[in-house]
Amino acid sequence: MIKYLFTFPIYIGNLKLDKTFVNKVKKFKLKKHEFNNNNYYDNTKDISCVELDDFFKEIAEDLKLTSFKITQTWIQKYNKNNFHDCHTHDLANFSFIYYLDCTKNSSDTLFYNPLYPYYHFNEYRVKPEKGKCVVFSGAIPHAALPNKDDKRLILSGNLNFFNE
């Protein structure tokens, strides 16, 4: 018998949040979309965030790779009852969510198994906390549940890990 086990790691780090960076992000103009406010479709969306570098380097090391490159970033602001329905990102890359502002009433991020919705056997919830960063395979379906406050602010992005 041969057994293959396919796994998709989810990395979670609690990082020191730079208030100057958060204030800079809060100044970006966001457009109202169906589920939330964001700048995903704007050409001003790429945002440098060096405070994530050490965390991303640590993940690269765990993956036995030497480098990373952020390929895209965007901001999402969730007001009361806003959400982001189940979706995936670029399936060949990793993605991240960096919680910049939230309260105990801010909505969780829900991760499903990679076969969802065809085969639903597992879920993993991440409770937002200021400074928490979650890195995951873009193939993992995930959603932001309906928000219960007006504070949930995240920086999201996609990145590649590779050997130089």
Image (cartoon, rainbow, N blue to C red):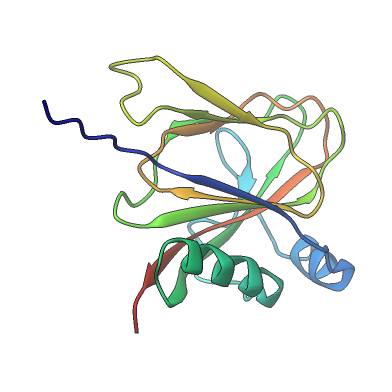
* Residue sitting at x 53%, y 62%: 59
Tell me where residue 162 appears, x and y as whole percent.
35, 73
Q: Is residue 18 visible?
A: yes
* Residue sitting at x 19%, y 30%: 3
Tell me where residue 27 appears, x and y as whole percent.
78, 65
Tell me where residue 133 appears, x and y as whole percent.
67, 53
In the picture, measured across the screen, residue 65 lies left or right of residue 110, that is left
* Residue sitting at x 52%, y 59%: 157
- Quarter residue 20 falls in: bottom right
Q: Is residue 45 visible?
A: no
112 relative to 30, above or below? above
109 relative to 52, above or below? above
149 relative to 22, above or below? above
Quarter the C terminus occupies:
bottom left
Residue nearer the viewer, 132 or 80: 132
* Residue sitting at x 11%, y 25%: 1
